[in-house]
Amino acid sequence: MKYVVIIPDGAADEPIPALNNKTIIEAANIPCLNKLAGLGQIGVAHNVPKNLPAGSDVANLSVLGCNPTLYYTGRAPLEAAALGLKLGPNDWVVRCNMTTIIDQYMRSFSAGQISSEEQHELLTALQDAVIGDYPPGALEFISGVGYRGLLILREVPGFTVPLSQNTRTFAPHDYTDQRVWHVGPQGAGGELLLELMDKSIDVFANHPVNKKRIEQGKPPATNVWLWGQGQMPVIPSFKETYGKTGAMITAVDLLRGIANSIGFDNIIVPGATGFIDTNFSGKAAAAIEALKTHDVVCVHLEATDESGHEGSVEHKIQSMENIDSKVVAPIWEALSSSGEPFRMFVTPDHPTPIRTKTHSYDTVPWLMVGTGVPACGAASYNEKAAAQTGQYREEGWKLMGELLS
Ligand SMILES: [Zn+2]
């Protein structure tokens, strides 16, 4: 049996007054998903437990059948896993944003979408400035894409990482245009993190990168903001848990990190951008190809989530329609005509409602269809139709077991 998992990230939404109280999925023209709803089972599930952040990290662990309560250790560790970084059991990873803070107000959590090159220069300068204060190897700044970097804290002779479960940090994107003097790192190791943030203020103040940005009328990166800390998760591989091999198709680092953590192969598709202009058809073709060599293939599409953050009804509907016609339909077509047994599982990870432009804890509608799955006869696939079947799963991560059973 072959299995394909399709994740329209953040696609679930609320009834929208401008759409006559239809949701995005309901308003979108998605004939293939609507047909499959009737041929299979639909229902709703919670992918994010109340005590964890409602992020793509937690929610996608659930979709891939990992209990986030057991295995979620923070966003930064999954991003480190995406880079293939190996860390010891006493090492920690901290997310390191470039931010713009002026007169104690968070003016940009991305330092005006600073470029990867600029970020790299600034982080190198910071690393050079602090490296002498700690034993060799204890601290390492790693630049990522755009404003996103990581700080690795390693246990080495003479240095024990002071962070613990009691360390508290705050996501900078939650404080846009707010005063932030009171939301610096707190608790165990908070002092060390604050010290590094303070140090970056001095290092960045007269740095050539910032001088140039100011000349160009762009916001300077005034400092690093440290948050999202965690230790590397020890997640049993998907093969160990479910006895199946798998592959991931995504444009997003975080998802690649999750894939690496569970032993999935990452398949890179040219033109996969994570935005509305992504190569939808290329991803579908890559999935059909990957199913020849893997038991489970997961196709993750970020465009629906980005449109939600943007607050664009039009883009979100268009993204959903593209997913239906260019991803779900061709994969369904290929699998049905193959003559081999297969199942398809479609589910958003979490809602990203247009109204709030951010992730929510609400349920998501799921669809399971294929060999051996009884037909429920539903007329359409959307939040309301899925809720009406009474197929509610409080722990969304258990659906993977149902899919594979
Ligand atoms: Zn997401």
Image: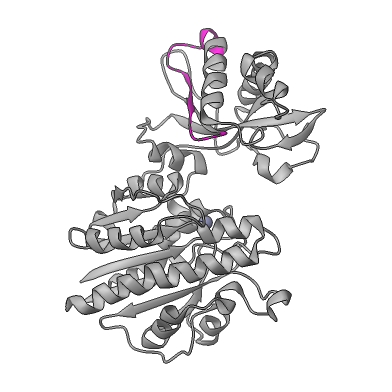
For this orientation, the residue located farthest to the top is 132
Residue 203 occupies quadrant: top right
**x, y percent for residue 57:** 49, 51
Q: Quadrant of the C terminus?
A: bottom left
**x, y percent for residue 261:** 35, 46
**From the viewer's perspective, is 405 left or right of 300?**
left
For image coordinates 59% across by 63% down, the residue present is: 315
Residue 212 occupies quadrant: top right
**From the viewer's perspective, is 255 left or right of 20?**
left
**x, y percent for residue 385:** 53, 84
- Residue 127 appears anywhere in the view: yes
For image coordinates 59% across by 59% down, the residue present is: 307
The boundaries of the magenta stretch are: 130-147
**From the viewer's perspective, is 211 left or right of 114?**
right
- Residue 358 appears anywhere in the view: no
- What colour scheme was applied to this rendering of the protein? one colour
The number of numbered discs placed on residues in the rendered structure image is 0
For this orientation, the residue located farthest to the bottom is 377
Residue 354 occupies quadrant: bottom right
For image coordinates 72% across by 23% down, the residue present is: 214
Q: Nearer the viewer, residue 351 or 214?
A: 214
Residue 58 among those drawn in magenta: no
Q: Nearer the viewer, residue 84 or 26?
A: 26
Q: Quadrant of the N terminus?
A: bottom left
**x, y percent for residue 147:** 57, 34
Q: Nearer the viewer, residue 152 or 213?
A: 213
Q: Is residue 186 above or below residue 211?
A: below
